[in-house]
Image (tube, rainbow, N blue to C red):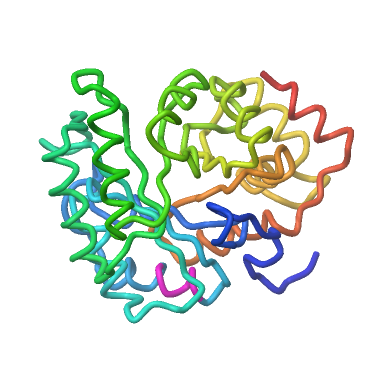
Amino acid sequence: MDTILNASKSGNITLGGDLTVHRFGYGAMRITGEGIWGPPKDHGSALKVLKKAIDLGINFIDTADSYGPYVSEELIAEALYPYPKDLIIATKGGLERTGPNQWPVNGHPSHLKEALEGSLKRLKLERIDLYQLHRLDPKVPMGESLGFLKEMQTKGLIRHIGLSEVSVEEIEAASQYIKVESVQNMYNLSERKWDKTLAWCERNKVPFIPWYPLSAGKDHANEVLKTLETKYSASSYQIALAWLLQHSPIMLPIAGTSSAQHLEDNMRALDIHLSPEDLEKLDTVV
């Protein structure tokens, strides 16, 4: 197994037709406190893992104003600003925080305005390269939420717009207002609820960003992964990440961690090349 770790091994994917990033990104949710609330227990470790991500060639970092809230974005700027020229930071708006593990949806334009302005300030950016609506708000007409984001795009504060936790029908409805350039849905070896959305993304060459890519999985999935650990000299988590990358060419995993060592461990998935037989076995595990 190649011991050189670098995200470039994952290959490249293009966002919005003009932003090319490696297909192995970093999700910056877990550098905050417990319950994704407040500051991290170890501030230094949080900065270290962000810097390690850059050292390992990662050039796509996913965050949100609600992570902390605000803490994740602040740490990213503290650790990495001024940013490498090729680094793309994607952030999200559309959720409020009322306490640990509490995520009320708010897609009202006034809230999105506050969220966007806050993200720009915290990240020290003049424009967000990829701004994703964290959730569609059933209490707010889609056209109001997306119309605001489109307006901000026209003003140059947002480069590209993405959606999170959406069905094919919702993407197609949203496409009346915006050009959907990314989709970020929960997806992993055991959670395939969004297979149809993934297929839509494949047809339209839209990057699919799976959040929670390292779910512990269902018992059967875990059993299958266990049977492959010895063959590939890898952990179940590494095999699950390798499966994501090989499952679809438009997949952009963002495995998150607060540990630099764990980040390195995750990246060893890039050296795993599943056989066609094992890939099929994992494809049909659910």
- Image coordinates for residue 171, horizontal then vertical, percent: 47, 27
Q: From the viewer's perspective, tell me whether residue 25 is left or right of residue 23.
A: left
- Image coordinates for residue 88, horizontal then vertical, percent: 45, 64
Q: From the viewer's perspective, tell me whether residue 6 is left or right of residue 216.
A: right
In magenta segment, residue 247:
no
Residue 62, located in which quarter of the rendered image? bottom left
> Which one is in front, 198 or 150?
150
> Eyeballing the image, is 141 above or below 61?
above
Residue range highlighted in magenta: 50-54
Residue 76, located in which quarter of the rendered image? bottom left
Q: Quadrant of the C terminus?
A: top right
- Image coordinates for residue 240, horizontal then vertical, percent: 65, 40
Q: Residue furthest bottom?
A: 82
Give me the residue at 24% from left, 22% from top. Answer: 141
Give me the residue at 27% from left, 68% from top. Answer: 126
- Image coordinates for residue 199, horizontal then vertical, percent: 65, 27
